[in-house]
Amino acid sequence: MTYTNQFPKGCCEDGANSGSPRPQQSTLIVQGTELSNTVPSNCNTYNTQILRTAIDSLYLSFQGDLSEESSIKLTELKSLAQSDISERVALAQIELADQLFKVHERGSKLFSFVIQNNSYRISLAKLGALRAPLAYVQISSELLTKKPLLDIVTELSTIINLLGNVSEEAAISRVDLCADFTTDYHLFDIEDSDWVTRADDIQNHSNKRRYTGTTIGAGGDVSARLYNKTVEMQKKPRLYLQDLHRLMGWDEKRDIWRLEFQFKRDFLRELDIRYVSDLESSLAGLWQYATVKWLRHTIPNDFDSTQSRWPVSEWWLSMQTADWGEGEALSRKPLDKGHIPSDRTLFVNGISGFTSFMAREGVLDPYEAITAYLSAAKQYHDNREHITGLGFFDYISQKVALKMREFGTHKNISQDSDSHPADKAVADAYRKYSDGE
């Protein structure tokens, strides 16, 4: 199909701008997957710079059965996570392939167990489950940014094989592809009628009356999101992503936008994309389908009532021609362990209580103040030991153990036993089996 527009709305034949309030578009021609721009040089153009393309989310499922040993361990660990005693909650960890996972106190939907660290969220079906796969795994966006995909899948397969018997290659349940970009185009002026899409639902979003994005086809087998990534990162900082954007040419002044497409299992199978081995060679094709056939942003033509013939906008042409070549040189950074707080969290937000103590006590020297702070904290907790059952040092140890479980930085050991409760549960189960109980 060919989409043409000889003169953009608001632009005269001689190139003079008519003063229309909406951004106008240069002449574009789209033929299949060959895209070109044939605009006169004296008409309005809008600079769009793509900073990166990437797999933002990936969900995999593993068919198989949970091993009996893993079932016993996870049942015990889940019970520990549900305890009212902090020392027991801190022990709700499992180490697999040199990685520590927090064991959640509850399962999810069809899955009895959930384990998680900063790389993976793994939902596991109980032993003998018939309606669910052995494991359903969400791979973190940070890991997908920092590590090659095939290395991730190899590592993950090793972890799942330690938990049960895997019967086939990991299947893709969902994949999200994204392009981060900056543009001069006035995205906030886009109207719903500008979109040509196979989806029925279009939702626009704003924050404090500032346009922040659009969701198209939410809940479908294919859906899209266009949103202001800068606004999102102001609420949830992603320092590794900001560093990557700078490396790719971001000037730190312009807002970064993200165009993201979500593809679910049923649609992927229609394209014969079932496994990760099918995915890497299909990224460009998926993106091309999404930006050419499934969704286009167009420039209205007052002289043509057939929307499918309207030309694509200049910024959308940049999306269609986004490069999906490999960029592994930017992906080999080590991943931070656990959900570790940043230095800003620790030394800006976290220092608030200490500086409040200094102000209350009228102490200006921080070295003098820290000694006084620890002494006052010890006295406070020791005086409450008859109520809480914890003196100062026990209180600190308990809090540190819980944080270590949360961050995945250290495996906690029971203080009143030579073995971990989960290991003891496995040993007891095997002893009962051996004794014929």
Image: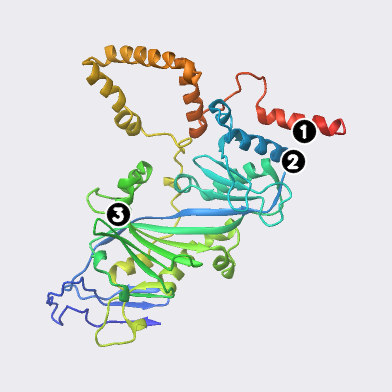
Name the kind of residue labelled 3 in the image. Ile
Residue depicted at x 22% and y 81%: 7
Name the kind of residue labelled 1 in the image. Ala
Q: From the top left corner, tell me how far across and down residue 161 is, in percent.
A: 67, 44
Q: From the top left corner, tell me how far across and down residue 57 is, in percent.
A: 48, 53
Name the kind of residue labelled 2 in the image. Glu
Q: Quadrant of the N terminus?
A: bottom left
The reply to whether discs 3 and 1 touch (Cβ–Cβ < 8 Å) is no
Q: Read off the residue under disc 3.
A: 256
Q: Closest to the observer: 180 or 423?
A: 423
Q: Of the residues tagged 2 and 3, which is closer to the observer? A: 2
How far apart are the two marked residues, 3 and 1, measured between alpha carbons?
A: 55 Å
The reply to whether discs 1 and 2 touch (Cβ–Cβ < 8 Å) is yes
Q: Closest to the observer: 411 or 80?
A: 80
How far apart are the two marked residues, 1 and 2, measured between alpha carbons?
A: 10 Å
Q: Read off the residue under disc 2.
A: 68
Q: Secondary structure at mark 1?
A: helix
Q: Counting other residues with Cα less than 10 Å from the Cα at mark 2, is it few (<14), some (14-19), or many (20 or more)?
A: some
Residue depicted at x 33% and y 68%: 316
Q: Read off the residue under disc 1.
A: 429
Q: From the top left corner, tell me how far across and down residue 365 is, in percent.
A: 23, 14
Q: Earlier in the sequence, mark 2 or mark 3?
A: 2
